[in-house]
Amino acid sequence: MIMLPKSQLIQAVSRAVSRGTPASSVLPDVTPPLKVVVEPPPKKLTNYSLALSTPNSAITSSCSIAGVSQVRWAHTDLKVPDFSNYRRDQTKSSSANAVESDGIRKMTSYLLVGAGAVAATYTAKAVVRGIVGNLSPAADVVALAKVEVKLSDIPEGRSMKMKWRGKPLFIRHRTDEEIEAEAQVDISTLRHPETDLDRAKNPKFLILIGVCTHLGCVPIADAGDFGGYYCPCHGSHYDGSGRIRKGPAPFNLEVPPYEFLDENVVVVG
Amino acid sequence: MSSLANLSKNLYHAVFRRTSTFVIAVVVLAYPFERAFNVGTERYFRFINKGKFYDDIKGQFGQDAEEE
């Protein structure tokens, strides 16, 4: 609606207009400033009209040509809460000198993060070890494992120790004197009577499980009073065939099941 | 103490400022931490369960005298 000053309206109405083109009626040459007045929006007086103004979903602002344009709502009724319980003491006051407390603030932050990172690294190491350890042979596979030994690697008079099914395995390449000495032992004097030939299929090689029959320690080879093994835990003496001679052990050292595949190779288990 | 302030300043500039140096420091410190943590927790476990381990009651069996 364009408003003109009243005077001009009255003039326009009261003047006689000659019959002619509308262009012949001319208004005085004053161009008034155009005042554009927008009608105020209707007052929201009902629940329905109020509800139309309230946001009913997550507030976003979007503007598109063919789609919906939404306006972000600024909630001026919300108060920013007081965070002073979470703030650092050194910087709470607005007049505090931040440079002075810079060192302490930095160190607390970084040292806490560093300590947490070290603990996390330790945890990660343990987790990775567990996962990678999953690739190793399962317990039941290890429990029934066989081991193949090349006997030519063992020089005469020396013994070889290896791990078999979680237990120590002793293989000794015996000299002729040792074999002779063992063959001549009177088995009736032994606590656990067994001849040397019972225990070693091929007397040249003595294959034993190195676990003391008393309480399970590992005996030491070439030690003890009988030219064989000696268990340091409780002082059991075994001879050159692994038979118990002195000390608390009740039985001779155990002989595992084994086979000679040929002259040089034995499969234990 | 100004020497403490100096130390923290140098520590920051040498280690904490760059992520790469921070990570190196963390990984290097993880090894002694692992050892110390394992030893510490083991000792604590033995302390809590004192009297239940074989080591604690070994003396009661009189076998040690036989050991040469």
Image: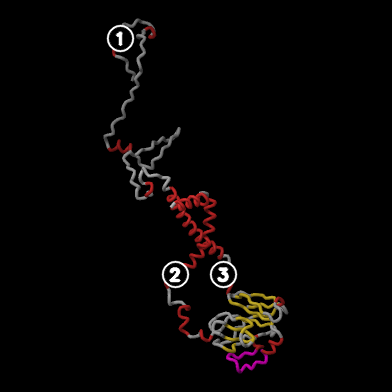
Name the quadrant containing residue A94.
top left
Residue marked by disc 2? B44
Vertical arrangement, residue A31 with respect to residue A231, above or below = above
Residue A138, numbered label: 3
Q: Nearer the viewer, residue B38 or A128?
A: B38
The crowd level at tag 2 (other Cα within 10 Å; few <14, some 14-19, many 20+) is: few
Residue marked by disc 1? A11
Name the quadrant containing residue A93.
top left
Task: Give the CA separation, mark 3 to mark 2.
Answer: 31 Å
Q: Amino acid at mark 3?
A: Ala
Task: Give the CA separation, mark 2 to mark 1.
Answer: 108 Å
Q: Amino acid at mark 2?
A: Tyr
Q: Amino acid at mark 1?
A: Gln
Residue range highlighted in magenta: A182-195
Dot 1: chain letter: A
Residue A191 spot, x, y in % from top left: 58, 91
Dot 3: chain letter: A
* CB-based contact (under 8 Å), mark 1 and mark 3: no
Dot 2: chain letter: B
Vertical arrangement, residue A137 with respect to residue A9, above or below = below
The crowd level at tag 3 (other Cα within 10 Å; few <14, some 14-19, many 20+) is: few
